[in-house]
Image: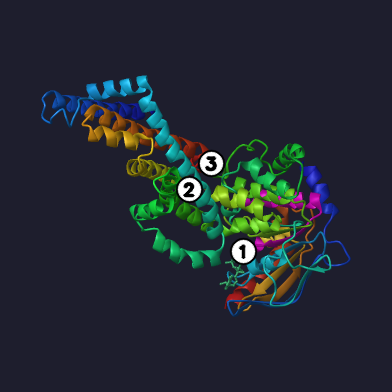
Amino acid sequence: MNRIAAVNQSANGPRPGRAQIAFSGVTLNLGGKAILENISLDVKPGEFLCIIGASGCGKTTALRLAAGLYQPTSGTVAFDGKPMLAPRRDIAIVFQDYGKALLPWRTASGNVSLALEASGMAASQRAARIDELLKKVGLPNHAGKYPAEMSGGMQQRLQIARCLAQEPKALLMDEPFGALDAMTRQGLQDEVLSLVRASDATVVFVTHDLEEAIYLGDRVIGLLPHPGRIGIELKIDLPRPRDQLTTRENPEFLRLRRELFDFIKASEA
Amino acid sequence: MNRSVLYWRAASFAVAAGFVALWQLIADQRLVSPVFLPGPDRAWASLVRGFASGDLLDKLLGTLEHMAYGWFVASIAGIALGAMIGSSRTMRSYVAPSLEFLRPLPVSAVIPVAIAMFGLTQSMALFVIAFGAIWPMLLATIHGFAAVEPRLYEVARSLHMSRLAIIFKIALPSASPDILAGMRLSVTVALILSVVCEILAGLDGLGHWVLLSARSFRSADLFAGVILLGVIGYLTALAMSMVERRLLKWRSSGH
Ligand SMILES: Nc1ncnc2c1ncn2[C@@H]1O[C@H](COP(=O)(O)OP(=O)(O)OP(=O)(O)O)[C@@H](O)[C@H]1O
Ligand SMILES: [Mg+2]
């Protein structure tokens, strides 16, 4: 498993060519206030982009724009060259509050099934696909459990499984591990890396955690608050596969961490 | 756990038996004239006699029928209307004031209107029962639909679920605890109104039976009818809470 993950991790990364997600001059006002201002950003297919920034700077809002849940006040958001006018089935979004994003009256397999039903998959084919997805996220023995019977980490895995059921071209994740303890969080980071690399999906990953951003990303973008705009952009050239111990001890990792830390401190000042 | 459940069962049974014994004692001592108060023995005998002759069974079925039709119509209408109103914020703000006006209106005030419209008929009973029983379900459904986690609607949007799928897979199940609680309340309302309508319109049912028995001072028959009404109320409430527990298994499980 680890070997496969390792091969996959090093196999892809951002692919050259047209941007998959393209923000050009995006401004968004909500309630008469500019939340995001003049954001231009290209995310390449297969890229793992992390967004960091102080609380309230507009990270979630940016992700919702990318998901098509919001429309920009001015500027455009495009996906594969076409303007995003509504949410798309091939863009999956993992919410931070997994407790609210799952159907509490459906079991784990029922929750994964929701996405398959929506895609019109025949009932006869769903069971096998559900098993496969639950296995992928490490929940093969919990198919019959209700979300209320699962730990936070398991619920977040379940949400990820449902998102993978959409076979997304892009996976948008909003502080997916923010509510989990450090050990669970590190385990899930590695799982997400190998899942994503195995699926070729583009990822936009919002996090509070600077180290998490560097550890996961091909690139990290930092937002400045009031109104939200891009304040820093760092390319992460750390070797893949990443490793919880060696990557985090890499001098380049420490240098990047320092740079982001200074950025956040300055942005809050 | 199981032990204490058993204990409480036994205790409540003992209390009930105590009441029956007390009732028997009062009747035997003639503290109340037997014309008004038969002992449990006579009430029981009348119950057995009524069922043996088939009379009481007919009345029982009559009441159950009124209750079931009224409750069924109220459920369908209440849930459908509640879903419509509850799932749209504009509808809620337009309709809520009228509901607030209609809701506290006692059903007894509606009965003359219904009699004027339908006469002393089954339709009148159906209308009155349904009108009275719709409120708990309507209000519970509106509340349940309005309280659906907005996050789930976003999940539905990003999955491109149809409007129908959103209603049946997200909104209805999410509102189901409220709806079922409303349905449980309105069963009781339907029972009460069935009896009232039977008394008023002379429709075949336990209400009518009780009225006739009282008029002719057949107190044992009167009590047999009252006991049956109590049993209906108890059993329907019990059945509803069993259905609730089964359907809402996902809620009680885990933490
Ligand atoms: N619907 C809304 N109407 C008005 N203002 C909003 C709305 N949603 C968010 N905001 C404001 O926009 C700003 C950015 O919110 P957003 O949730 O995107 O921040 P964030 O970076 O995700 O914060 P956090 O790290 O705390 O999750 C905040 O100041 C918030 O108050
Ligand atoms: Mg946020």
Q: Which mark is residue B250?
A: 3
Asked if disc 3 is less than 8 Å from ligand 2, the answer is no
Q: Residue at x 28, y 34 (%)?
A: B212
Host chain of mark 1: A
Q: How far apart are marks 2 and 3 (CA)?
A: 27 Å
Residue highlighted by disc 2: B74
Q: Which of marks 2 and 3 is nearer the N terminus?
A: 2
The residue lying toward the viewer, choosing from A254 and B209, is: B209
The residue lying toward the viewer, choosing from B7 and A10, is: B7
Does the CB distance between marks 1 and 2 fall below 8 Å? no
Q: In this view, does A193 lie above or below B1?
A: below
Q: Which residue is drawn at 55% across and 41% down?
A: A149
Residue density around tag 3, few if under 14, some if 14–19, many if 20 or more, within 10 Å: some
Host chain of mark 2: B
Name the amino acid, label 2. Answer: Ala
Residue highlighted by disc 1: A208
Q: From which residue to which does the magenta span run?
A: A185-211
Residue density around tag 2, few if under 14, some if 14–19, many if 20 or more, within 10 Å: many
Asked if disc 1 is less than 8 Å from ligand 1, the answer is yes
